[in-house]
Amino acid sequence: MAQSKLPGWVNAGLIPALNLLTAFFVSGLVILAMGENPIDAFGYLIYGAFGYEQAIGYTLFYATNFVFTGLAVAVAFHCYLFNIGGEGQAYIGGLGIGLVCLYLGDLPFWAILPLTVIGGALFGAAWAAIPAYLQAKRGSHIVITTIMFNFIGSSVMTFLLVEWLKKPGSQLPETSHFPDQTWMPKMWELAEKFGIKMAHSPLNLSLIIALLCCVGVWFFIWRTRWGYEMRAVGRNPDAAVYGGISPAKSIMIAMLISGGLAGLVGLNELMGVQHRVIINFTNGYGFVGIAIALMGRNHPVGIFFAALLMGALFQGGSEVAFEMPNITRDMIWTIQGFVILFTGALEHMYRSRLEKIFIRKDAEGTV
Amino acid sequence: MGRNGNSNTAAGGQPPAVELINLNKFFGHVHANKDVCMTVERGTIHGIVGENGAGKSTMMGMLYGFYQASSGRIRINGREVKIKSPTHAIKQGIGMVHQHFMLVEPFSVLENVILGAEQGGLIKTSMDHARKELDRLGREYGLEVDPDARVGDLPVGLQQRVEILKALYRGAETLILDEPTGVLTPQEADQLFRMLDTLRSQGRTVILITHKLREIMEITDTVSIMRHGTMVAHRTTSETSKEELAELMVGRKVLLEVDKTEATPGEPVLALDGVGFVDDTGVSRLEDISFTIRAGEILGIAGVSGNGQSELLEVLFGVSKVREGTISYHGKPIAGPGKHTNSLGMHGLGVGHVAEDRHRTGMVMDFTAAENIILGYHNNPEINGPILMDLKKVDDLCRDYMEKFDVRPQDPSLLATGFSGGNQQKIVLAREIERDPDLLLVGQPTRGVDIGAIEFIHKQIIELRDRGKGVLLVSVELDEIMSLADRILVIFDGRIVGEVAGGEADERTLGLMMAGIDPTREAQGEVA
Amino acid sequence: MNDILMHLVLVADATVRMSTPLILAALAGLCSERAAVIDIGLEGKMLGGAFVAGTVSYMTGSVWLGLMAAIVASVLLALLHGFACITHRGNQVVSGMAINIVVAGLAPTLGHALFHINGDTPSLPASARFMSITLPGADFFRDVPLLGPLYSELISGHNLLTYLTFALIPFVAWMLYKTRFGLRLRAVGENPEAVDTAGISVEWLRYRAVMIAGVLCGIAGASLSTALGASFIRDMTAGKGYLALAAMIFGKWKPKLTVIACLLFAFTDALQARLQGVELPIVGEIPVQFIIMLPYVMTVILLAGFVGKVVAPKADGIPYVKER
């Protein structure tokens, strides 16, 4: 993480863009290898994601999930913690949301909403708490513990959905339906109230909550003392201790907030669409969060655009799979993996070549 | 070409062991070595002096094959060679003992010696051969060491022996030593020099890189001085002086002594009574430490690195917990068994701390100067609000400090890594001094700092003392302690073993105390 | 009495069989991490190996070609990881995760493109698999009390890859501790600068370590789809790569202890299959999910430090930058 000698826009814009293009290029090669035309595929992707009003709604709907999980990973990253447990934290957060909706569902919506936000965040944070504590107090590597907790969470939720929370009389591992008041208003429904006609899509109020989280996270990391302490601990725990900062406290705060953010995915998926807790509703979104955080350089603005991009990939990907028989939705994961590879692990690949170009221009005077 | 400097060669008629001819090295646009020329005669000890960043390490790096010269030639024993890697260098008979040891701590001494010089695919043959060789070398040069000992468990002096043995095992004819005495007591350093003397008498060549002018005068035959990447001069040691060398190193007349008035100590600020400390592995690091620091006094703690000074600073600053004894501040106990303080508390009481290792504990290198200037004080309501930080205030504060302490460049948004060592240290110093502490704890204040900044920092410390504050100065640089401290305590093996008034201190006495030897008994009996 | 013994032997037998991919992957991770390259990508390499083995065995009818292809595929993935981590000094954890995700998506995608059965590969006939090998005399000694079933059930009757795995264990230990290569590999994991100044290439050493990991993971993957199973099924590694990492940490980065940890984890897996639907005294029937959870919970407990201190190779995860 040494200071780069490159100008800011290159660091923040050009390099990520190049990395992204490379990821797409390599994905294109794979598509070619499967006997399909990558240019056509790309065309279907764009159309499927943005080509008609309903598609945009779906794209934004997916993006909402990714904002939550991306912010979760990013907050932890600022304390140099790699939280891979977003999947489990989102899943358990969904449990919290489900419980509120099922047992407090008689309250009016505007009372339920804050309670579900708290419920989701609390349960998500709780699922991050043990790995956080183990890292803070016993130095247990958070990567391994969070991965383990993903698996444990999956088992726990399966058990709950099959044994305790199952809808009576049903064979499916899912809960009863949530009462109507708990349904998150869709954007097109809200638009209708203002006389605006919008295409019907699952896009709902959670998007606003996600955007509010972006703002909140920005303030927290760069404008509060806890954010300052967290960043110090991440970069140099020894100096932080000498500066009167408790690394254990910062690690806990970072992970609890991270888990809490991940736990809000259920607002979008469960309260917005499913209206019941179903098995595996997180669908890998926790892992996507890693790609989002890396692409977005751990900054809320970047995360929003990265989420948008990934939402487009998910939504457009369905179109591609529909139009091209040889491509399945699994391809989306492959592309995502390449994105993580090129923006996360190979992020410095172009750096030395760019340094040669830009520093030569700057040769007079400074160097 | 041509010969550089006057040299009385001991080896008549033989080609010089090492010749560097117009070596240049660029790192990108940085011209680290400019037309460097140097000749080292066989069977001599040749010194190289220069400040940090003068280019000594780069030059030796080229000789040892770490770097390739951008241009220039190297001759070994009169033959021109291209040294492309450390393996080549070793083949040319060049061995290097690095400042930071290149040892694998979990390995035994034998395993470390054979690493890279193994014979064959299985290590058994190499180990057997090395065992015999080490035995021989140990006896011949007084470098005995247990071949099966785990290197990580060895004391620093023995670890250095292993490094030297590594070089000799590989048949080094020319031995390069990079700042070898930083981790040794004066007595251990003497032992090292005697070994170098033996090497010299055998016709081997030694190149000694050091910034300790005293050592140059003591042991070397010839010396080269580097400044800003160029070879400034060569001298025969017997024909020059410390003052001349210092001036050549810096380019101007340098005060090797600090100007200071007599101290007028006042009330006790800090008192330690029987303080003991045990580290995580159960080893006792401090035992029965008792002393007092008064206002308006600089108390120096001298000692070889690793004798408890670091632990003392950590305990005083509240980072580590006291096992027994009490620490009192302005008469009130603040730490003892069952009663702990912490760095936040100490800051609040008015104690400042300039860390020994600014990279590890003093600053966050990836933070900006502004962010570093509030480290430890960021919760101070004068600086930041209850929830949000006041970034404008922090920025102004940073500019103010940078002005007062002549930090260059005066840019609060520059990352700490963008500043030179001296400027980084000034930032830390500014942070701690400007909070107007009653007591300042300072560790290694001028480590990795160039001479100009050293003078400035020393002045600041004296000024603080003159304002009636107390200062605790921990340093491994005896010169620094002797020139700044009003009183000197010597720490050895976790205990205070002696106290000397600043004006009466002499190196020999201090050196003996630092090695745990009672100087009065020494004086009575054996001859050194 | 005999019944319980039989049960134990059968569980032990299942343990040995199921430990095969775990041991191989754990040893792979160990070789890589002793050289200070963290390998989270064991999962992906195994999955990739499993897919390629299943595909090539089916298409060529030769399980040996399948095995070799699996090794090649896994080594290529390992080289990718090496390229990112060693040459480009990228974040090693991110690289490993990325490879896992790429393979998780790529394998079923390619599988679907080739075979159109939801991403899986077609079932392999016995001729294209590693089947159980009956050791000489197994049938003869079966009825000998105590030792008989031990020999005929536990020791005999495993597939070739399992036998290979147990032969590889002492080989890996020998390589690490008795050869020049092993000495250098261990050195580069503790103090790469010392290795560099001795004139040895840090990068090339690490690449070799990473490639060894690739070979072992390739065999592990092949064992899944051609020995323990009869085809590649999507996501068939089911977290074994991460369990292997946990076993390596459990084993303090030493081969013998690591293998014991793998056997322990495999034991819980074998136990889980047997305990389903079985009423135990006092606790009653244990929900299957809790047994499935067991290895993961054990790992967390281990990492929490209740089973002793965990010290990784000193340079683990730190890319080597020539600091001069």
Image: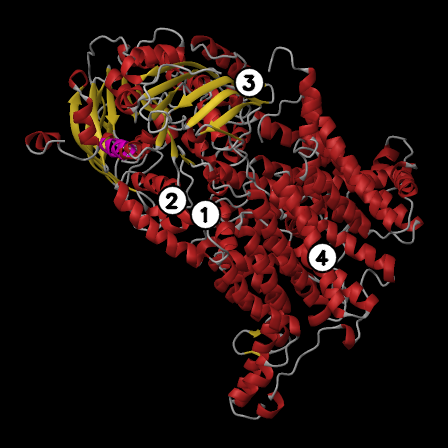
The amino acid pointed to by label 2 is: Tyr
**Residue at mark 1 to residue at mark 4: CA–CA distance:** 33 Å
The answer to whether marks 2 and 1 mark residues whose Cβ atoms lie closer than 8 Å is yes
Q: Is residue B66 left or right of residue A12?
A: left
Mark toward the viewer: 4 or 2: 2
The amino acid pointed to by label 1 is: Ala
Inspect this view and state whether residue A211 appears: no
Residue under circle 2? B169
| Relative height, residue B390 to residue B68 (above, below) | above
In reply to whether residue B174 is colored magenta, the answer given is no
Residue under circle 4? C72
**Residue at mark 3 to residue at mark 1: CA–CA distance:** 34 Å
Q: Residues within 10 Å of mark 4 (few under 14, many from 20)?
A: some
The amino acid pointed to by label 3 is: His
Same chain for mark 2 and mark 3? The answer is yes
Residue under circle 3? B31
